Amino acid sequence: MKILAFDTCLDKMYVTLSEDEEILSSKIVTNKDNKYHSAFLISTIKEVLKENNIEPKDLGAIATNIGPGSFTGIRACTTVARTMAQQLNIPAVGISSLKILEQHAGENPAVALDARKNCAYFIINGEIKGAVQIEEVEQMLKAKQYNLLTDDKLQIRLGGTSYQKDNYPLGETLAKLAYRKLKSEECKWQELKPLYIQPPPMG
């Protein structure tokens, strides 16, 4: 099964094409000329498909990061994923950015991402805790020796490793997690929804 996976929720955009768990192509796009990277999503998808001589009709599933992360990025990738899956009549798989990053945190993983308002989007012991006060995150991390993966801002407060300081293959991880989910669940595009842990900002 050919899976097109993309992510515009985090600080870079990832577009990956895979055949089951084999990665065929993977691209990373950063913000360019004051344009947010999600503005390049459609053109990058077309580029990846063309380079691999793949037509949209050849795809077996669409996968995307559903958040948490940038509200603009979450809206962009979930909308494109639902639209493509509907038009092609194929499954659409949503994977949380916390689950994606957790795969790169090592043994006893924990992931904390800045949620503003003195909160962090947090996953620990495989459980997404939601938007948690930083003080609560610090207390939970003291329970045992966790390998914390976080972002540049929270690394200053919480320690651990910032995913933004390295080039983790997050698009490839998304594709592999999506394939595993497709094997165990029925993933309907109608059920694909953004993971808004906090409400979008007003205005």
Image (cartoon, rainbow, N blue to C red):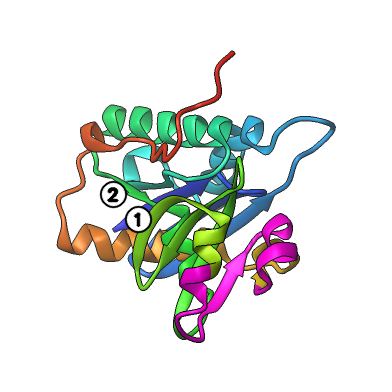
The kind of secondary structure element at disc 2 is loop
x then y, percent, for residue 23: 47, 67
Circles 2 and 1: CB distance less than 8 Å?
yes
| Residue at (76, 30) in percent of width and height | 35
Under mark 2, the amino acid is Gly
| Res 85 quadrant in image | top left
Q: 10 Å neighbourhood of mark 2: few (<14), some, or many (≥20)?
A: some
**Residue 83's spot in the image, x, y percent?**
36, 27
Residue that mark 1 sits on: 2
Name which residue type carries label 1.
Answer: Lys
Q: How far across and down, in percent of the image, does residue 117 sit?
A: 61, 40
| Relative to 60, residue 31 above or below | above
Is any atom of residue 172 visible in this view?
no
Instruction: Answer whether residue 77 is magenta in the image.
Output: no
Q: In the image, 81: left or right of 171?
A: left
Q: Give the mark count.
A: 2
* Quarter of the image that includes the C terminus: top right
How crowded pointer 1 is (Cα within 10 Å; few <14, some 14-19, many 20+) is rated as many
Disc 2 and disc 1: Cα gap in Å? 5 Å
Q: Is residue 157 magenta?
A: yes
Q: Which residues are magenta?
A: 139-160
| Nearest the eye: 104 or 114 | 114
The residue at the far right in this view is 33
Can residue 111 be seen in this snapshot? yes
Q: Nearer the viewer, residue 191 or 142?
A: 142
Q: Which residue is mark 2?
A: 60
Q: Quadrant of the N terminus?
A: bottom left
